[in-house]
Amino acid sequence: MEDVLLVYASMSGNTEAIADIIEEVLKEHSVNVRRAEVYEIDTRDIESVPHIIFGSYTWGDGELPDDFLDFYDEMDEIDFTNKKVAVFGSGDTSYDIFCGAVDLLEEKVKKLNGTIMVDGLKVELAPFGEDVETCKEFAVAIVNSIRQTIS
Ligand SMILES: Cc1cc2nc3c(=O)[nH]c(=O)nc-3n(C[C@H](O)[C@H](O)[C@H](O)COP(=O)(O)O)c2cc1C
């Protein structure tokens, strides 16, 4: 069984680029990670893992993109008690609600009794320069949190 499931949605590749960095860091630290786009998974996939990382870009007016909406509704069927979750996303600061999808997913997890293991990561468009380091630090913080659970 994997230690962590990395689930994301990305239309133009920016969120996917963040997922790439996170996945690489997890693997460097020997964390067993399964990566999937949100349309590939269902509630059973979530139920079977103790740690989940969600990634989404933001659409509309600070909203989740259509790709995430069905899953967002299905999340209500999952008991997130004892699950540790981290959320990241790409957005654009020229919009009023920057990376609103990150906040929406975090709020949903908390409402369903999940634990946010690392504060949400919000990246302007594609990770570049210092943002790459920030993404790596986010991933290392996840590794540390996972180690606390499984050690
Ligand atoms: C129609 C539209 C609405 C958007 N709304 C928001 C928004 O409310 N907040 C935000 O931070 N970014 C918003 N964005 C920007 C995207 O989230 C941003 O381009 C992101 O990097 C796309 O990620 P992706 O390459 O993974 O698809 C919007 C983009 C479009 C085209």
Image (cartoon, rainbow, N blue to C red):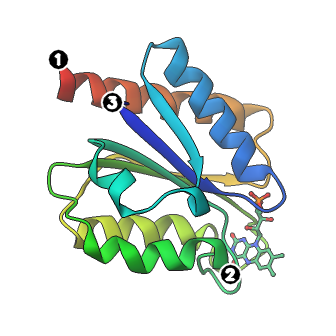
- Residue annotated with mark 3: 1
- Identify the mark nearer the N-term, 2 or 3: 3
Q: Residues within 10 Å of mark 1 (few under 14, many from 20)?
A: few
Per the image, label 3 sits on a secondary structure element best described as loop
**Mark 3 and mark 1: span between their CA atoms?**
16 Å
Q: Residue at x 50, y 57 (%)?
A: 41
- Residue annotated with mark 2: 96
Question: What type is the residue that disc 3 sits on?
Answer: Met
Numbered tag placed on residue 151 in the rendering: 1
> Percent from the top left, x then y, of residue 132?
70, 32
Question: What type is the residue that disc 1 sits on?
Answer: Ser
* Label 2 lies in ligand 1 vicinity (Cβ under 8 Å): yes
Per the image, label 2 sits on a secondary structure element best described as loop
Q: Quadrant of ligand 1?
A: bottom right
Q: Residue at x 67, y 41 (%)?
A: 18
Per the image, label 1 sits on a secondary structure element best described as loop
The residue lying toward the viewer, choosing from 15 and 128, is 15
> Percent from the top left, x then y, of residue 78?
26, 66
